[in-house]
Each structure stands twice: as structure tokens, then as C-alpha cells.
């Protein structure tokens, strides 16, 4: 049964905690915890803490993204946020991530504040990164800098890393955007992967890798799939071309 999306959480101003996290758990139960009790919560499995509205004339483009890393559909609030979802999905150090799974509720002296961080990221080593995605034109505005400072302090208290990001590196984004089209499971084409990985035990260009087949349409798609999933390694800082060198990642069972 699909859980009904909860209503947007409202900050609980009467909460006495200096910093708390307000969220819906994976079962849809609303919870409020002080920060010192939130370390063991799996926020990557929590429901979004609010809806992403759509309306005529809005300046950003909400939608949904399928994350290969966790096989889940995630809602995003803007196209820029979707870009960072795709970059996180490609990152080999990221295990999974979720969108706006809680609201921070804090106090600075006599001032109360609240904030929905954009992306909660669980790395493969278990550590946490919190990302806020902002239009580059907004990042240096005083209210945005204050929000970032408060969120940074909150993450420090929780033992998490924090970044506020704008536009991604254009070269990295071009590569990731292209490979993302091949991130889904191989299914019937899976046997081709074994041949490609065997041929790539030593570095060779993509063109050389595919030279065994006169019309390697399927094999090319599998190659890009293996590159997305880091089974074929390559230099992500350089443009993706047929002369790009690729090589098979070490087999974890033999390392």
C-alpha cells in the first residue's frame, strides 16, 4: 500500500528544545526529536516533510527523479535540485539520499527559526552530508547566508557535513547527464557486460572496446551503463568521447 503524502509540517514553536528535528518516519508517523536523539534516525527512509506545490507562473520546475542508488522515486522542487540528485546518484561514495525529509526547528537567543534542508545524503561509509541547493543569484543574499550559517551550526551539532551549492561543474554535469540515461538495470543485455569488462582488464579507448562488433549499439549502451555504475572507470574531468580511456574496476572479491 502506498502511503498518502503527509501535509506540510508546521514548525512547533512551543517546543522547548534549542534544536529539534520534525519529520515523518518511513511509516508516516509524525515525530519531533531533540538533536541529541536524532543521530540514529534513518532520514534517508523518511517521507518528505512537505509537499512541492505546482502552480501557474511559478519560477522553478518541480518533478520526480528515479534514483538508481536506492531504486526510489524522489520529488524535487526545481530543475537545479534535480541536477544535484543526479550527481549524487552517480557519486560512488553515496549510498542513498532523500529530499527534504525533516525540518530544523531552532532558537538563536530569543529568535526562533526553521528550515527544510533540500537533500539528506547517506554516504557508503555511514557518514551524512546535508545539501542546500540555491540559485547562484541568491547565495550571497544576507537571509540565505544566515540560513546557511544556522544550518551549518546545526549539522556541526549532529556530526554531519553541510554544503550550500549552486550550479554544478559544467564538464562533470555534461558527463553525468549523458550517462544517467543508461543507469537502469541491463536485463537481457546483462551477458554483454561480462565481455566488455573482460576486454577492459587493461585500459583501452571506448572505440577499441567496441571494435569487436560492427554495429555496437547495444554494446555501447551497456558500456555507458557500466561507466555510470563505476564498473568501468574513466577520467570524469575530461569530455566523454570515443577516445576516452576506460578500464575495469577491481573485482572486490579479489582485492
Image: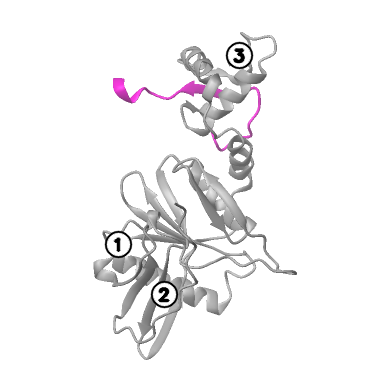
- Say left or right for 30 vs 194: left
181 part of magenta stretch: no
Dividing the picture into quarters, in which one does residue 240 lie?
top right
Query: For the point 61% across and 38% down, which residue is it?
Result: 175
Query: For the point 45% across and 15% down, which residue is it?
Result: 201
* Residue at the extreme bottom: 110
Q: Main secondary structure of the magenta part?
A: loop
Query: For the point 64% across and 34% down, which residue is it?
Result: 239
Helix, strand or loop at mark 2: helix
Location of mark 2 (residue): 150
Location of mark 3 (residue): 208
- Is 11 located above or below residue 218 in the figure? below
Magenta extent: 234-255
Mark 1 vs 3, N-terminal side: 1
Distance between mark 2 and mark 3 Cα atoms: 52 Å
Number of marks in the image? 3
- Is 42 located above or below residue 143 in the figure? above
Q: Residue 159 has which mark?
A: 1
- Indicate the position of residue 222 as horizontal and vertical percent values: 57, 23
Mark 2 vs 3, N-terminal side: 2
- Is 223 located above or below residue 49 in the figure? above
Query: For the point 62% across and 64% down, which residue is it?
Result: 136
User: Dot 3: within a 10 Å radius of its alpha carbon, few (fewer than 14), some, or many (20 or more) residues?
Assistant: some
Q: Nearer the viewer, residue 68 or 18?
A: 68
- Say left or right for 32 vs 233: left
Amino acid at each position: 500500500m502506498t502511503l498518502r503524502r503527509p501535509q506540510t509540517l508546521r514548525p512547533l514553536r512551543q517546543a522547548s528544545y534549542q534544536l529539534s528535528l520534525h519529520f515523518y518516519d518511513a511509516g508516516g508517523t509524525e515525530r519531533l526529536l531533540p538533536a541529541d536523539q536524532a543521530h540514529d534516525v534513518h532520514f534517508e527512509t523518511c517521507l518528505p516533510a512537505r509537499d512541492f506545490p505546482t502552480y501557474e507562473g511559478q519560477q522553478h520546475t518541480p518533478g520526480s527523479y528515479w534514483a538508481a542508488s536506492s531504486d526510489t522515486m524522489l520529488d524535487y522542487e526545481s530543475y537545479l535540485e534535480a541536477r544535484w540528485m543526479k550527481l549524487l546518484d552517480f557519486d560512488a561514495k553515496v549510498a542513498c539520499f532523500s529530499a527534504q525529509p525533516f525540518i530544523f526547528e531552532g532558537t538563536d537567543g530569543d529568535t526562533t527559526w526553521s528550515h527544510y534542508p533540500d537533500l539528506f545524503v547517506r554516504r557508503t561509509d555511514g557518514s551524512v552530508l546535508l545539501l542546500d541547493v540555491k540559485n547562484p543569484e541568491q547565495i550571497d543574499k544576507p537571509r540565505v547566508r544566515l540560513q546557511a550559517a544556522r544550518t551549518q551550526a546545526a549539522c556541526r551539532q549532529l556530526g554531519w557535513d553541510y554544503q550550500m551549492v549552486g550550479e554544478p561543474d559544467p564538464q562533470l554535469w555534461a558527463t553525468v547527464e549523458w550517462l544517467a540515461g543508461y543507469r537502469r538495470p541491463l536485463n537481457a543485455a546483462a551477458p554483454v557486460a561480462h565481455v566488455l569488462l573482460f576486454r577492459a582488464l587493461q585500459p583501452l579507448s571506448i572505440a577499441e572496446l567496441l571494435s569487436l562488433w560492427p554495429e555496437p549499439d547495444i554494446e555501447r549502451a551497456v558500456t555507458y551503463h557500466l561507466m555510470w555504475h563505476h564498473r568501468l572507470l574513466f577520467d570524469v574531468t575530461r569530455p566523454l568521447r570515443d577516445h576516452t580511456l576506460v578500464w575495469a574496476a577491481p573485482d572486490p572479491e579479489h582485492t
